[in-house]
């Protein structure tokens, strides 16, 4: 099972009802999905189980205190005299926060009926207001639109199928094969969205008026601040962590021609994404102190506005810092995660788990950006 990114043109709904479920208005989508499910051979309890499993995989719930990690999904034969648990061992869940954080920064609603999202670029610089006693003095004129910037809006989807025999086995024998597949589809969809936040989607989609659009990620958006870490983050040099973060904060606060008009992380807050391999460095004793706290605690004390986020998606020698401000980015939300189904024959039901959430990055003509990308970590 694998996630794919495609334009809406690449999706071929098998019926007019499915077209409405994907490309219709919100009311049309809701009614079409209800009708598709009513027309299927599966009852309400099946869909309740499938949707619950899909959401569980997508939302990636945190393990409870008295539960243990689970890994390496496999179904094993067993002897009838062995007392066996009914729990299936799932893949270990990855730490997924990139899309969640971006949605919290800002969300723009859109529709799957649109294949692109654009905004007008209006001003090259800061416009100053005028002050006078009679109001007759002329201020600077706000510029008219100078062009458009935008992104393509590809869908992320995962396809899977459940045979009639598997469904009968599930109903008659109490297994949950369809639920396990739905849960896996949700997990894969969510992982793919996090990868999209970092690396984007480099397929060029033609615009009707000419030119092409893609989707940028944190690691390749043109407007990002680029640089190198102060030194490698190793257990023998834990001080490089603090030096690197303070260098990044300085880069944010001193970009552009007017340092008063910058993305100020101290007032807005920021997310710092690093590879999970560096947790060992963050847990080392703080070299600036007397040994009473580790590097992580020192950072939280000195820079409480920087939220540390570990992710396995980013390479070990890179970090990304993002300002928590809508001027930095928005997520264009054209479709929340959902499940569609159709019958391709009497013996199998096809399912497509899909979403359409894509990052749109902003920066000014002066080069003021809310995204920073360092290598050499």
Image (cartoon, rainbow, N blue to C red):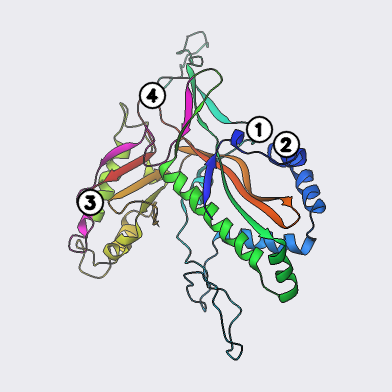
Q: Residue furthest bottom?
A: 81
Find numbered disc 4 in the image and state the secondary structure of the residue it sits on: loop
Residue at 62% across, 31% down: 114
Circles 1 and 3: CB atoms closer than 8 Å: no
Give how far apart the Cα atoms at labels 4 and 1 are. 31 Å
- Depth check: 238 or 342 in front? 342
Where is residue 5? Give x, y as percent.
Answer: 52, 42
Query: Residue 56: in sight, yes or no?
Result: no
Quarter of the image where one finds residue 257 = top left
- Main secondary structure type of the part rendered in magenta: loop
Which numbered marker is on residue 277? none
Query: Where residue 118 appears, x then y in whole percent?
Result: 54, 27
- Residues packed near mark 3 inside 10 Å, few (<14), some (14 to 19) or many (20 plus): few
Q: Position of residue 268 (x, y in %)?
A: 43, 44
Distance between the alpha carbons at the discs numbered 3 and 4: 29 Å
Q: Nearer the viewer, residue 371 or 247?
A: 371
Image spot of residue 330 (x, y percent): 51, 38
| Residue underneath mark 2 | 24
Residue bounds of the magenta highlight: 211-240
Binning the other alpha carbons within 10 Å of mark 1 as few (below 14), some (14 to 19) or many (20 upward) gives some
Position of residue 26 in the picture relative to residue 297 (left or right):
right
Q: Which residue is mark 4?
A: 365
Query: What residue is disc 3 on?
Result: 243
């Amino acid at each position: 099972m694998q996630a794919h990114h495609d334009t809406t043109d690449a999706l071929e709904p098998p019926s007019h009802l499915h077209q409405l479920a994907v490309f219709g208005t919100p009311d049309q989508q809701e009614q079409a999905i209800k009708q598709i499910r009513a027309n299927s051979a599966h009852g309400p309890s099946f869909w309740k189980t499938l949707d619950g499993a899909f959401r569980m995989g997508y939302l990636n719930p945190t393990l409870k205190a008295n539960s243990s990690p689970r890994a390496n999904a496999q179904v094993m034969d067993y002897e009838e005299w062995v007392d066996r648990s009914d729990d299936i061992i799932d893949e270990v869940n990855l730490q997924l926060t990139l899309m969640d954080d971006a949605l919290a920064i800002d969300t723009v609603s859109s529709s799957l009926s649109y294949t692109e999202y654009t905004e007008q670029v209006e001003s090259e610089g800061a416009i100053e207001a005028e002050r006078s006693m009679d109001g007759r003095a002329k201020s600077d004129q706000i510029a008219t639109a100078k062009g458009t910037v935008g992104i393509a809006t590809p869908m992320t989807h995962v396809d899977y199928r459940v045979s009639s025999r598997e469904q009968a086995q599930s109903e008659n024998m109490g297994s949950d094969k369809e639920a396990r597949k739905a849960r896996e589809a949700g997990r894969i969809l969510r992982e793919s969205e996090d990868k999209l936040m970092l690396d984007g989607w480099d397929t060029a989609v033609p615009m009707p008026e000419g030119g092409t659009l893609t989707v940028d990620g944190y690691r390749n958006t043109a407007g990002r601040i680029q640089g190198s870490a102060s030194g490698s983050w190793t257990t023998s040099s834990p001080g490089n962590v603090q030096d690197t973060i303070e260098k990044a904060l300085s880069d944010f606060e001193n970009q552009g021609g007017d340092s008063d008009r910058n993305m100020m992380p101290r007032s807005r807050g920021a997310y710092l994404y690093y590879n999970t391999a560096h947790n060992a460095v963050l847990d080392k004793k703080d070299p600036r102190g007397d040994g009473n706290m580790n590097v992580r605690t020192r950072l939280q004390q000195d820079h409480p506005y920087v939220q540390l986020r570990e992710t396995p998606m980013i390479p070990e020698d890179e970090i990304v810092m993002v300002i928590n401000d809508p001027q930095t980015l928005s997520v264009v939300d054209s479709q929340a995660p959902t499940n569609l189904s159709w019958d391709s024959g009497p013996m199998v039901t096809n399912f497509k788990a899909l979403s359409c959430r894509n990052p749109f990055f902003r920066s000014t003509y002066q080069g003021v950006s809310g995204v920073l990308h360092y290598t050499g970590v």
